[in-house]
Image: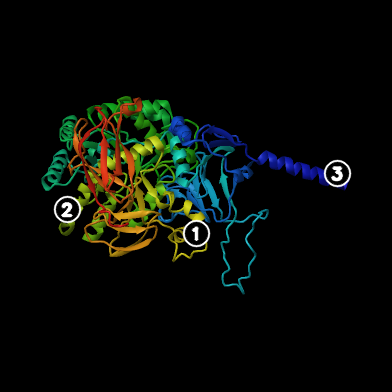
Amino acid sequence: MIAVYVLCQVLYTSILAQSRQMEWVPVAPGVWKAVTGMPENMDPLRVAGIKPNTTALEKMGDISFPEHLRKSTGEQSDAGTFLSFPLQKNEQLYGLGLNFKSVQQRRTVKELQVDHYGGEDNGRTHAPVPFYVSGNGYGVLVNVARRVKVYAGIIARKDSKDPPPEMNRNTQRDWNPEPGSDVVEMIIPAAGTEIYVFAGKSPLEVVQRYNLFCGGGVLPPKWGLGFTQRTPTLFTDQQVLEEIAAFEQKGYPLSFIGLEPGWQQYSYPNNFVWDSIRYPQPQQFVQQLLLKNIRVNLWINPYISSHAPFFKNMQPYTGSHLVWAGQVPDLTMAPVQDLYKKLFTEKHIDIGVSGYKVDETDGYDFWLWPDNAKFPSGLSGEQMRQVYGLQFQKMSDNWFREKNQRTYGLTRASNAGSPSMPYVIYNDYYNHRDFITALCNSSFIGVLWTPEARSSKTAEEWLRRMQTVCFSPMAMLNAWADGTKPWTFPEVADEVKEVMLLRMQLLPYLYNTFAQYHFEGKPPVRAMNLVDGFYFNATAERGNLSSSDNPYEMALRRDINDQFMVGDYLLVAPLFAGQKERKVVLPQGKWYDFYTGKLAGEGNIIEIKQEMGKIPLFVKDGGMIPMIPAVLHTPRKNELLPLHIKYYGNAENNMELYDDDGETFDYEKGNFAKAVLSVKKDKKGTLKGNAVLPESKDFHYNKVTWEFMTANNDK
């Protein structure tokens, strides 16, 4: 009988293990889905309304499922759903939300929740996307609108096949209190969830597949890539016009103006109606700015004042708790979306407003609704918090799409499924170094982040912050509190103007980079760990070299969070206040100084001393940087500008340069054009540039000139 009992227990354990093991079903090339338990009927991908770009995914080709993930498991209990994903030895992990302190996330514990960032990478952040990317070429996304507790290779299991060795702290100085584990475990307070796996030949391909599965990255309007100034809170229309005139007179570029809470009659909570004293004729004001080729962006948060025109009609659709004594609308409900659409369209969009800054949708706990809050849709407070910012992004994006008008704005909260949303994340945290780390981390999770400039203690700090701003997805000075101007520090005013104008000159390159984001899924700003030859391919080439001989070994051991790529060719290595020199880790191949064209290094670590007025920039061998003349405003829809192409290195190369009208969604109907830029060596070995420009109304560059920055002297 005992033998029979033992056999039954073995069979039962085997059946239980099989029932917990996930079944992966292909849903797109290189993308698989599994379901464990009973998923809820509300999740981030559903809120985002994703439409996978299957054509682009097919172009990437098929790839095998990561076999070790076959052992992934999911189980349910009264406490929720438990997920387990195997990890391989020396595997590095990235992602797991918008982090500000570190890029590599293995051996971390996080509770992923939408919240204001509080200075610690604990999972409470503006975009707690439950997606991690492995350096081994795969990514795992958990599609759930819940708080997700993640143990990323930190706590070892008793049944591990590769447990950490037991050590004696008394005698072993290298005793480790956090020995790590070979598994990623997650705890979700829900009866089930969907899980997606994305595979690629490199971490970048994994991120591309995720972005394309979510519909492809956003392609902003061209004006969104210009410079924006957010004016002080209680500015009047005349003060805004005076500010714009000052920018023009002093020669500083400006493409859109942000109006802070005072544009409304009531704010915190809001009535969403123009203040009749500060803005007596809002339509005339907005149109006056449009004539100057400057757009208007309005600050809002979603919490409703009793003075709002739709206050009474909204009452059946608001939650059980208040925020700043304002009603909290259930944004997931169609009647709420209709009421917002009617008011915002009539009062804002129809008169020419171009976008929104959506504030206060992230946290903190002591003023946002609690988890036990109730909403008419049946969602809990916890669920609503995870998708609230995402829902407003989707809702407002649809308003502009119906008018065939692109928008580009700011948000405090996002989640999975957001790559195609026309919003950039910002916050009130103000650590310059951490801002750069967040730029790196944003590239793993399909969001955009901007390290805005607000104020500085010294002229040097101001310049360094402004230089960083000009190499981010949105170039923003936020003067809502103190009225800071680009020229506030006269001793660096010229240097600030120089980098702002460089941003404008780089518009063709930046716009082409965002086109890659949309059509190919490549993030416009990329952590170095996504760069070919920096991390993924380097592991196979380490051999027995030490970190002093091989920078890639160093890259494996060190968190490279203070440099990043913009597009395929441009490496940005910011300097911070008080820093006169720094180290830069260059990927494989030759890299050249952007300003001089001189060889900077080749797959090594360099130490640089940069002059005060410039941010360190490096260009990959064969890199083409298409530019336009320095302009104060982004080009108008049909404006033609000459194209100047800077070429670096001695390698032959070619690239496509994308363009469209820069304002509408007609590109989705095929109304765009591409030039073919190529550099070849003639019989004497001299590099020659050639540009084949399309004969199309959608291409707005002409009179191509070439500048070969490297004088063929680095062979």
| Discs 2, 1 touching: Cβ within 8 Å | no
Q: Disc 2 or 1, which lies upstream in sequence?
A: 2
Neighbourhood count class around disc 3 (C-alpha, 10 Å): few under 14, some 14–19, many 20 upward: few
| Discs 3, 1 touching: Cβ within 8 Å | no
Where, quadrant-wise, is the C terminus in this rendering? bottom left
For the image, the number of numbered tags is 3
Q: Which amino acid lies under the numbered mark 1 shown in the image of this protein?
A: Arg
Q: Is residue 31 in view from this perspective?
A: yes
- Residues 262 and 144: in front is 144
Is 378 positioned to the left or the right of 3 in the image?
left
Q: Which amino acid lies under the numbered mark 2 shown in the image of this protein?
A: Trp
Mark 2 and mark 1: Cα distance apart in space = 48 Å
Q: What secondary structure is found at the residue carrying circle 3?
A: helix
Q: Which residue is mark 1?
A: 542
Q: Disc 3 or 1, which lies upstream in sequence?
A: 3
Q: What secondary structure is found at the residue carrying circle 2?
A: loop
Q: Is residue 244 above or below residue 286?
A: below
Query: How are the residues colored?
Result: rainbow
Q: Which residue is mark 3?
A: 4
Where residue 501 appears, as percent x and y from the top left, is: 20, 47
Residue 405 figure quarter: top left
Mark 3 and mark 1: Cα distance apart in space = 54 Å
Q: What secondary structure is found at the residue carrying circle 1?
A: loop
